[in-house]
Image (spheres, rainbow, N blue to C red):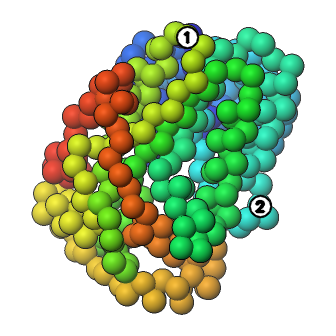
Amino acid sequence: MNKIGVIGATGMLGQPVVKELVKAGFEVKALVRNAEKAAKTLPAEVALIQGDLKDMTQIKAFINQIDTLYLSLSVKQASRQSHFQPEREGIQNIAKALEDHTKLKRIAYLSSLVQNYQGTNGFDWWVFAIKLQAVQIIKSLSIPSTVFYPSTFMENFTVGSYRQGNRILLAGDSAHAMYFIAAEDYGRQVAKALKLVDDQNYDFVIQGREGFNADAAAKIFVENTPKKLKINKLPFGFMKVFGSLGAKFSYGRHIIEALNNYPEAFAAEPTWEVLGEPTIDLQKFANMH
């Protein structure tokens, strides 16, 4: 299964995975909406196929060229529930395209651990509902699946949800440890997972070696990055107020509430036995950024 097709290759988590797949010797193709733009961020070895998840013909043409399909999709923070969502309508379209397709040998999907907070303490968010449904659809397909359930990515301190310019923005009380993982380590684990040649369905929990709550992790990052950053912390009540001001603020309010309260347990040892252990701790990651 050397031909891997990636959808979501240019995203924050797509790019590091694609780089590791190329390093591992896979022939990588990426379905992208803007090939010219994608060429600036992806390795030259990646074949860029222009297409869109809204177009069934383009989806079918893409999967006919590959052995394994890897999905790195997300809900954009500024989008609304009524909008086209790659993890909802996009995956539904992929499932339809695969109904009469026999060439594809495996489908792999980037999920999350924190989505499991859905339904806890009355928490009900349409974004997590989409993610949970996506896993159900993928596992219902007639081809083998590999689903990755990562903890919080360290990249949230560089380009993700915690980073706002030269500030690390926190809100409320972070009640539990998160086992932060670097996307580079995750990419290496994905590459190893997709080299497994069998018909099994796999679920891999992806976590780093050490657990920190958001406050402790932010402190480590700020103290070890070469950049001059400050930590700002707001009461969660402010997030509730801001959450009513628009889709992006609502997204921030919900994801922070979930991350602050999800009781993440360490469960990555079975993954490490198969895919190897992560090598980048939070201090090392900060040093590099």
Rendered view: 198 above or below 23? above
Which of the labelled discs sits on residue 83, or is there none? 2
Q: Secondary structure at mark 1?
A: loop
For disc 1, the marked residue is 198
Report the number of discs: 2
Residue in view at x 24 percent, y 59 percent: 212
Q: Are marks 1 and 2 in contact (CB under 8 Å)?
A: no
Give the Cα distance between marks 1 and 2: 37 Å
Rendered view: 99 above or below 287? above
Residue in view at x 59 percent, y 50 percent: 74
Q: Earlier in the sequence, mark 1 or mark 2?
A: 2
Q: Nearer the viewer, residue 79 or 151?
A: 151
Query: Residue 205's spot in the image, x, y percent?
Result: 42, 39
* Residue type beneath disc 1: Asp
Q: Nearer the viewer, residue 25 or 207?
A: 207
Q: Secondary structure at mark 2?
A: loop
Query: Residue 121's spot in the image, x, y percent?
Result: 53, 73
Instruction: Place residue 92 in its image quadrant.
Output: top right
From the viewer's perspective, tell me whether residue 219 is left or right of residue 241.
left
From the viewer's perspective, tell me whether residue 233 is left or right of residue 83.
left
From the viewer's perspective, tell me whether residue 140 is left or right of residue 169.
right
| Quadrant assignment for the N terminus | top right
Which of the labelled discs sits on residue 85, or is there none? none
Rendered view: 111 above or below 187? below
Residue in view at x 55 percent, y 77 percent: 249
Query: Residue 80's spot in the image, x, y percent?
Result: 71, 67
Instruction: Place residue 213 in its image quadrant.
Output: bottom left
For the question of whether residue 167 can be seen, the reply is yes
Q: Nearer the viewer, residue 168 or 42?
A: 168
* Residue type beneath disc 2: His
